[in-house]
Image (cartoon, rainbow, N blue to C red):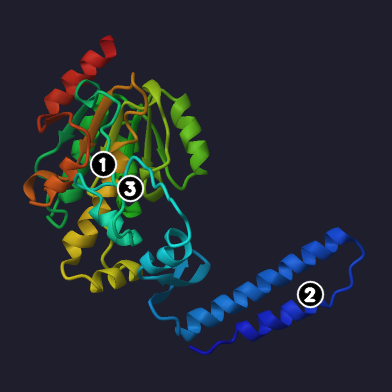
Amino acid sequence: MPDILSDPLLELRDALLELKVETHEEELEVKAFASRAQALASAVRMNLGQKEEGFVYWAERENQRYRLVASPVNVAETLRENLFGKADTVVLTSATLSAAGNFTYIRNRLGLDAPAELLLDSPFDFENQALLYIAAGLDDQQEAGYQEKFDAELKAVLTITGGRTLVLFTSYGQLKKSAERIRRELPDLGVLCQGEMPAYRLVEQFKAIPNAVLLGTASFWQGIDIPGDALQCVVIAKLPFAVPDDPIVEARMELLKNPFFEYQVPQATLLFRQGFGRLIRTATDKGAVVVLDSRIMTKNYGRSFLKSIPKCRITDKREDVGNFFARLKKT
């Protein structure tokens, strides 16, 4: 692809630096724009030249915006050289660093050779505070009528909870389909969808409306903090496997002997843990996590997901969910 951008960007940089300004503030602003033009020119040359080893390059479009992307396939060596090799001690801590009860995945991804490891249990009493319901018959997303079966199960769960529910999707297309049906068939619920307003506004409205249902993807799997009675149910629509034709995912998988179990399963497990963790945020929170993906029980890799979450009561009977929320409303 011919580079028709970097030279004009450098010309813009030079023109900006030649501008005569009257104040120090104007000088700083002009230099900032010139620096931005320089950075963009360098980024364009890197992406179109594709000469950096260990990188994967691609272009993508979102609405009317286009992006050129260059991403390192493996960050381990960079972290060794610029962080771990220069510091005497580095402490890495998070509630979701381990997958299936060990740190193998994150250790390999970050290039940690022989770290000291400590895995602690959750301080919360999940066995008494939480219920995990795994719906049956939803393990084949390619099956005819799958979306109807999925929406019927989701509708049944929302009828039980009456709101106060966060639904985590892996596909925005499926989110839109389910939202349309919920709004049509359960008009008493306040349905809030990612993309309809800024994320912080969605969370604010969710907290304020007692019968709200919040539907989200991607960023809503992590970083959302809704403690207390405002959130009593988290629905996980599908196990969050990365899309295999994503350029960076594809490049990383090509380097592995068994990419599904070495990369996709542990990565999805970590994200699943983060989604599961949206529910119990304090020692007094109570609620249910609903998984509308039967593969967690029917596939051998499902054990990795179940081993990665705190011990809690697990059921495949929807009436147990009804009984759980009936007791919850009495307390």
Q: Where does the image place residue 330, in percent across and percent down from the top left?
A: 26, 9
With 91 as the anchor, is 242 left or right in this view? left
Residue drawn at 23 percent across, 54 percent down = 104
Q: Where does the image place residue 196, in percent across and percent down from the top left?
A: 48, 45
Indicate the secondary structure of the residue bearing disc 2. Answer: helix
With 28 as the anchor, is 224 left or right in this view? left
**Measured Cα–Cα span from mark 3 to mark 2:** 46 Å
Indicate the secondary structure of the residue bearing disc 1. Answer: strand
Find disc 3 in the rendering and name its residue.
175
Who is closer to the viewer here, 231 or 281? 281
Find disc 2 in the rendering and name its residue.
16
Residue drawn at 22 percent across, 38 percent down = 309
Mark 2 vs 1: CB contact within 8 A = no
Q: Within 10 angstroms of label 3, few (less than 14), some, or many (20 or more) residues?
A: some
**Measured Cα–Cα span from mark 1 to mark 3:** 12 Å
Q: Which amino acid type corresponds to the residue marked 3 in the rendered image?
A: Leu
In the picture as drawn, the residue positioned furthest to the top comes out as 330
Find disc 1 in the rendering and name its residue.
236
Residue drawn at 14 percent across, 51 percent down = 145
Residue drawn at 15 percent across, 58 percent down = 142
Q: Is residue 166 above or below residue 42?
A: above
Ranked by sequence position, the earlier of labels 3 and 2 is: 2
In the picture as drawn, the residue positioned furthest to the right comes out as 22
Indicate the secondary structure of the residue bearing disc 3. Answer: helix
Mark 3 vs 2: CB contact within 8 A = no
Q: Which amino acid type corresponds to the residue marked 2 in the rendered image?
A: Leu
Q: Where does the image place residue 13, in percent across and percent down from the top left?
A: 73, 77
Ranked by sequence position, the earlier of labels 2 and 1 is: 2
The label nearer to you, 1 versus 3, is 1
Q: Within 10 angstroms of label 2, few (less than 14), some, or many (20 or more) residues?
A: some
